[in-house]
């Protein structure tokens, strides 16, 4: 059974994530896509992150009425920094087949993948499924240089660009704007009800929140 995993901070989960998951499902004939909210991603150490519980609630709401979309809480449940490779080891122990497990990501995430913990092992435990991100085509060169042969484990996913990013949405909400239309309605409702992004001052510098 072919399965997809879509990892992300999901702060908030948005229509770009949902379209990416749907595109991968069709392109790779996946039985389902498992959304994997990060616990404390080490690459964002020091950034002000919405709590695990809040990101879990938004993800649950986003996928509640979507057949084939599921939630994986492995990283939310693990204390400290969380690493993709550890999650893939856990899933392998649970019987997920390395050749039928696709870790789905956008081109921006692929460009950083060579800096992940143990990318070689990640590519043993799963294949990657990569989509363009807002016009940028996937570039495998950095990962291939770090892990020769990586390209053989990478599939391309075609999708129409969705010009939305979580950082832009946080900035919009912090300024009092609505997220409706860019996130599922249930997520927009949650952000409005909880005033999630209006509780602190969000300063965005090159995608990092300080
Ligand atoms: P931020 O703006 O805070 O960096 P983000 O919008 O990139 O957040 P993440 O949760 O970090 O959201 O992304 C999870 C995964 O989804 C990554 O692999 C990313 O490349 C992919 N992704 C996010 N938005 C899009 C989009 N609009 N189109 C294609 N892929 C996307």
Image: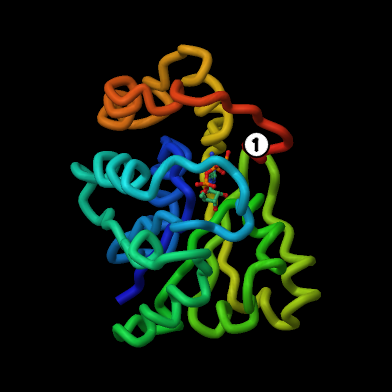
Residue at 66% x, 40% y is 208
Q: Quadrant of residue 155?
A: bottom right
Determine the secondary structure under disc 1: loop
Label 1, on which residue?
Answer: 210
Nearest the viewer among 176 and 201 is: 201
Q: Quadrant of residue 95?
A: bottom left
- Would you place residue 84 above or below residue 176 in this image? below
Q: Which quadrant is home to the N terminus?
A: bottom left
Residue 162 x, y percent position in the rendering: 53, 34
Give the side of residue 3 with respect to residue 49, left or right: left
- Would you place residue 3 above or below residue 203 in this image? below
Nearest the viewer among 180 and 97 is: 180
Residue 139 x, y percent position in the rendering: 73, 58
Nearest the viewer among 44 and 142 is: 44
Give the side of residue 19 with respect to residue 210, left or right: left
Residue 108 x, y percent position in the rendering: 66, 50
Q: Which quadrant is home to the C terminus?
A: top right
Give the side of residue 61 with respect to residue 168, left or right: left
Residue at 62% x, 48% y is 46
- Would you place residue 91 above or below residue 139 in this image? below
Q: Quadrant of ligand 1?
A: top right
**Pointer 1: residues within 10 angstroms few (<14), some, or many (20+)?**
few
Residue 188 x, y percent position in the rendering: 33, 25
Give the side of residue 13 with respect to residue 62, left or right: right
Residue at 54% x, 58% y is 41
């Amino acid at each position: 059974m072919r399965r997809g995993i879509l990892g992300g901070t999901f702060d908030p989960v948005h229509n770009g994530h949902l379209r990416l998951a749907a595109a991968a499902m069709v392109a790779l004939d996946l039985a389902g896509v498992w959304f994997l909210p990060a616990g404390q991603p080490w690459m964002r150490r020091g950034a002000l992150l919405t709590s695990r519980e809040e990101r879990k609630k938004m993800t649950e709401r986003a996928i509640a009425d979507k057949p084939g979309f599921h939630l994986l809480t492995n990283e939310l449940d693990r204390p400290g920094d969380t690493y993709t490779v550890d999650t893939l080891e856990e899933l392998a122990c649970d019987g997920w087949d390395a050749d039928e497990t696709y870790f789905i990501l956008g081109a921006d995430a692929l460009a950083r993948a060579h800096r992940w913990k143990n990318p070689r092992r990640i590519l043993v435990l799963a294949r990657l499924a990569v989509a363009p991100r807002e016009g940028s085509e996937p570039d495998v060169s950095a990962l291939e240089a770090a892990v020769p042969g990586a390209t053989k484990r990478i599939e391309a996913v075609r999708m129409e660009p969705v010009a939305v990013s979580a950082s832009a949405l946080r900035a919009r909400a912090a300024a009092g704007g609505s997220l409706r239309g860019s996130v599922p309605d249930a997520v927009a409702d949650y952000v409005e009800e909880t005033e999630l992004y209006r509780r602190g001052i969000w300063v965005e510098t090159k995608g990092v929140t300080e």
